[in-house]
Amino acid sequence: MEPAQAVTSNGNGSYDYDIISWFDSVSENAAMFQRETLHRILEQNYGVEYLKKWFEDIKIQEMDACALESLYTSLVPLASHADLEPYIQRIADGDTAPILTHQPITTLSLSSGTTEGRQKFVPFTRHSSQTTLQIFMLAAAYRSRVYPIRNGGRILEFIYSSKQFKTKGGLTAGTATTHYYASEEFKIKQEKTKLFTCSPEEVISGGDYKQSTYCHLLLGLFFSYQVEFITSTFAYSIVQAFASFEEHWKEICNDIKEGTLSSRITLPRMRKAVLDIISPNPSLASQIEEICEESQALDWYSLIPKLWPNAKYVYSIMTGSMQPYSKKLRHYAGTLPLVSAEYGSTESWIGVNLDPSLHPKDVTFAVIPTFSYFEFIPLYRQEQDWTSGAVDFIEDKPVPLSQVKVGQKYEIVLTTFTGLYRYRLGDVVEVAGFHNGTPKLNFICRRKLILTVNIDKNTEKDLQLVVERGSQLLSKYRAELVDFTSYADVVHQPGHYIIYWEIKGDVEERVLGECCREMDASFVDHGYVVSRRTNSIGPLELCIVERGTFKKILDHFIGNGAALSQFKTPRCTSNQMLLAILNVCTIKRFRSTAYS
């Protein structure tokens, strides 16, 4: 069952109704659609090399969907990216045999590389673009119920393509966002919704994120009264854009006033495209200048609704590693609603936000049963056996979507149309409830992002809570935390946690020492507390890095092929290049006095 093709969020209620009614139907029969989805994937790829070694000569075409589901999960083992990497590499090198799919794979996506320190190839097909369009249209329909928007408006999108390149075998490789922005589906989305991005393709695909950001801001302001909402893939990109605006607003105002373009924009295609759009508008420039002068005195509070008076909301991924940026985004947005975007990965889209009015911390994502076949590995935290060799969780056998339980944590497993079979995604989620028959998920953390020295096990979520607690002291001194990451130092004994902070504002060393102590004392993991009391884990170390350090980290990733719209600051790292940047830029160090 496919959704209606013509879908919009611009007030055309019948189209919104069509796609919402489609989703209601598939979610009511989620278990059936999951079995059908698996049947379609396996039928389309029957006989490919990877599946043949498990199925051999079993005629799956003759099996009913229930029997096939049971057979598939009993024969085909769970797989990590490392298990599939040799097959994907052969495809990248030009092997045209049906290795993972019958449909030829001509494009490969690159993961951001911020989780494990290196980028991975993931197959990308037309199905990837189609599901991206589908989830965007579905989400837009739900948003329009709460925040109706006008026909013919514009979107200020801070979106960025990275450079595509050819693999040894001639396949096109780049980030998933780059492939989508270059696809027909991206154009279709704008045509269907009658909402157009402020920036032309030459700005999106410019290849220099600083120049692109400047032009996004300039064009967003040039069309300021037409902008219906502000968006980017990740909240980080929006925060970065407005940090840039704080520096360059006078230049932007001058460009609007004169109809010119700053000399900092050096890319010829980008310059021409922008100059073809803008024209002198002294009146608008004066209005913006006045707003900026007032806002600067208020530390840029509520800047967004002042500059874009018709904007209805700010829309971006604000969960997981993006959660720390929501505070700064709220500062820029004032009372304008922050709407959390959909849940997905380079490998597959997973769930849609059905309640855009919820606070980003409370948002849940309803799984779309037709996008991939989903399984869930039940996870249990180790409460008793602190000497166990397990890394972070005790696992149970995977269960299908229809058997998950509210309140239980799981790791997601995917089987996709793009050739990933029982693929462990590494995301930990918790089931918050159900929409009809499909689960609504809370994203908890990335499973591999974990701080551990001894018998301690602290996840990304644990770290975020601790940093939030420690950084509360900064606000009393009109300072703020810009960004952070961490490292478990096991080279020096006893091993200990190092947390790196970049802060804005002047703070006394006494206060920073207190922040360090507060963080150390705020870890509640039993293994950590016991180890600190016995000194088998040393005092937490807080390193203050100079301003601009995390921009250097961003530049490092982008220099290695990542796109700004895909970038996530790694919350826990062992990447030696990143640690080298952090340590060179460290200007102050503090050791915790907790447990002394």
Image (cartoon, rainbow, N blue to C red):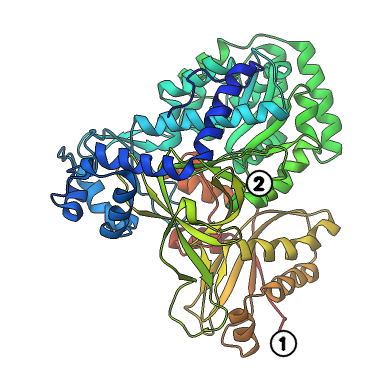
Q: Secondary structure at mark 2?
A: loop
Disc sitting over residue 86 in the figure: none
The spot of residue 355 in percent (x, y) is 67, 39
Residue 42 in the image, given as x and y percentages of width and height = 27, 42
The residue indicated by pointer 2 is 363
Residue 378 visible? The answer is yes
Characterize the local packing of mark 2: few (<14), some (14-19) or many (20 or more) Cα atoms within 10 angstroms: many
Distance from the alpha carbon under mark 2 to that under mark 1: 40 Å
Callout 2 touching callout 1 (CB < 8 Å): no
Q: Amino acid at mark 1?
A: Ser
Among the 4 quarters of the image, the one containing residue 389: bottom left
Residue 517 shown left or right of residue 456 in the figure: right
Question: Could you tell me how many numbered marks the image carries?
Answer: 2
Residue that appears at 59% across and 11% down: 277
Relative to 201, 441 lies left or right: right
355 and 475: which one is in front?
355
Sequence-wise, which precedes: disc 2 or disc 1?
2
Which marked residue is nearer to the observer: mark 2 or mark 1?
2
In x, y percent, where is residue 278? 62, 12
Kindly identify the amino acid type of the residue bearing the numbered disc 2: Val
Residue visible at 49% across and 62% down?
Answer: 447
Mark 1: secondary structure: loop
The residue that label 1 is drawn on is: 596
